Each structure stands twice: as structure tokens, then as C-alpha cells.
Image: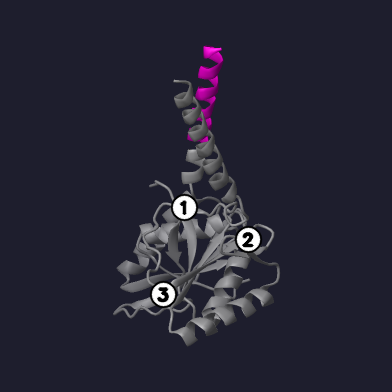
Amino acid sequence: MGKSNLMIRLIDIVFILLFGFIAVSEINSAKSIVPPKSTEVTEDSPEGAHIVIVGIEKKGIFTIGRGDIVFTDLFKLQEYFTKVAYESRSNGKKVGVRIRASWDAPVEYTLAVAKICKRLGLPKGIDVVRVIGK
Amino acid sequence: MNNRRFMIRLIDIALIILFGFIAISGLKTEYVNLPSGSNSQVTKQWPHEATLHIYGNYFVLQDTDREEKLRNLQDLEVMMVEVNNYYLQKQYKFVIKIEPHKSSIMQSLIDVFDICQRNNIDKNLNYDAI
């Protein structure tokens, strides 16, 4: 009985550590962005393409993916996208860009990123959170 | 002693449930395609374009001979539907050109997209507005 109690306790501790690490690992700058809410969103994310997620924070900080790459300069971001577009074309892969801007971020940053994508011929879209509305 | 063990076990379970929920509650996002910036749709009707300026806390709908300042989304939707119906009756295809200004925020832009989607109004986005 004592051994069984100890095992249960050990399993509990393992679970706590596991979930704790998973929870903590999600805390990065990309996750902290709260996208705008939409009631009418119908589009599914493009499939079969390599998707680059660009996070845009309120102060105009651009993050790539889970926040591993950070840009504060649009020119650097453009250079990055040019490289991504070139690599994808040479590999014959499709690339799409999802712009995940904070709901209260100025539209100008999103438009700037969208303009870069347009110039490079990359399909683009805005990430939103679906809510039940009208 | 037994009571203390029981309490520790309960705290363990509470922590497991808490971290479990945090771990699986990843933000689920959907995707809104951005308009291309040029009217690519071929329609049999003549297009008529009006401009919607988005500012920080109001909207301005600018048509050929009128300009309406709208303070909230409800008024904007009513006005857009009204203008759309007006041009539909005149056999025109109404297209709204969205021009966000420096003070506008993302939520306002998505709200305008939603209104267009809900009421089947064609939209264009002016990428050079800012």
C-alpha cells in the first residue's frame, strides 16, 4: 500500500513537471499576440504550402514563427522574405505568409508587411480569432 | 497524517489539471485573405467605387457627391448596405476601397472586412494609403 502511494505520488510529480514545461514553453512573443476577432471569417488556411507566420506587436516589432527571429526594421524583414521567396522558388515549394497582428496594433505595420509580400508575389492573409457574432 | 496525504494528492491533481488546461489551450486562429489591391473580378455590371477611410475612432465613407462621417460600426454597416443597394438598383457593381489611416487599428480593419463579407460587398484595400 505504501509503495503504491509512492508510485502515484511520483506519477503526479512527473505529470506536473511535464505539463508545467509544456505550459511554460508556449510563453513566447508570438503567443502573446492577441489577433483581432472576426465574426465572418470563412477562409481556411492555405494547405500544402510552407507557411511563415509574422507576428506584429503594437510597437512595430516583427517576429517570425514562434518568436525565434525578431525584426524591428522593415528592410531587414524584406530581406528575410526575399530570401524565403528565393529559397522556396528554387526548391519548387509554395510559400504563404500569415500576418498575426495584435488587435490593437496600427494597421500601417500590417499593410507594410502585406506590401512586401505583394511585391515578392507571396500569398498573404491576416490571422484572426473566430467569434460568434451577428 | 492521512489527511495531510490526501490534501497533497488533491493539490497534485489540481496542478495537473491546471497545467494540462494551460498546455492545451493554444490560441486557435483562422485566416482572412487580404484583397489583392486591384479589382480582379470580372462582372457584367459597371463598377462603382467608393472610399472608406478608417481612422482611430471613426470612419468616413466618401462617395462621388457625398461624405459621411460614422462614429460606430452599426451606423457604418447601415450606410454601406444603403449605398450598396442604391448602386445595385442602378445596375452598378458597388466596390468599397478601404483606406486605413495611421491612427487606425487592426480590429477596425477586420470589422470592416466582416461587414463586407456579411453583406456581400466587394472590397479593395489601398496598400499605399499610409
Q: Which amino acid is tagged 3?
A: His
Please state the chain letter of the residue tagged with numbered disc 2 in the rendered image. Answer: A
Q: Tell me if I can see residue B69 in this picture.
A: no
B90 sits to left or right of A37: left
Could you tell me which residue is drawn at 37 percent across and 63 percent down? Answer: A44
Measured from the top left, where is residue B107 in percent x and y? 54, 55
Q: Nearer the viewer, residue B27 or A66?
A: A66
| Residue A86 versus residue B59 in the image, above or below | below
Q: Nearer the viewer, residue B54 or B80?
A: B54
| Residue B8 versus residue A92 in the image, above or below | above
Can you identify the residue that label 1 sits on? A129
Cα distance in 3D space between marks 3 and 2: 29 Å
- Labelled disc at residue B48: 3
- Labelled disc at residue A106: 2
Q: Secondary structure at mark 3?
A: strand
Q: Tell me if I can see residue B71 in this picture.
A: yes
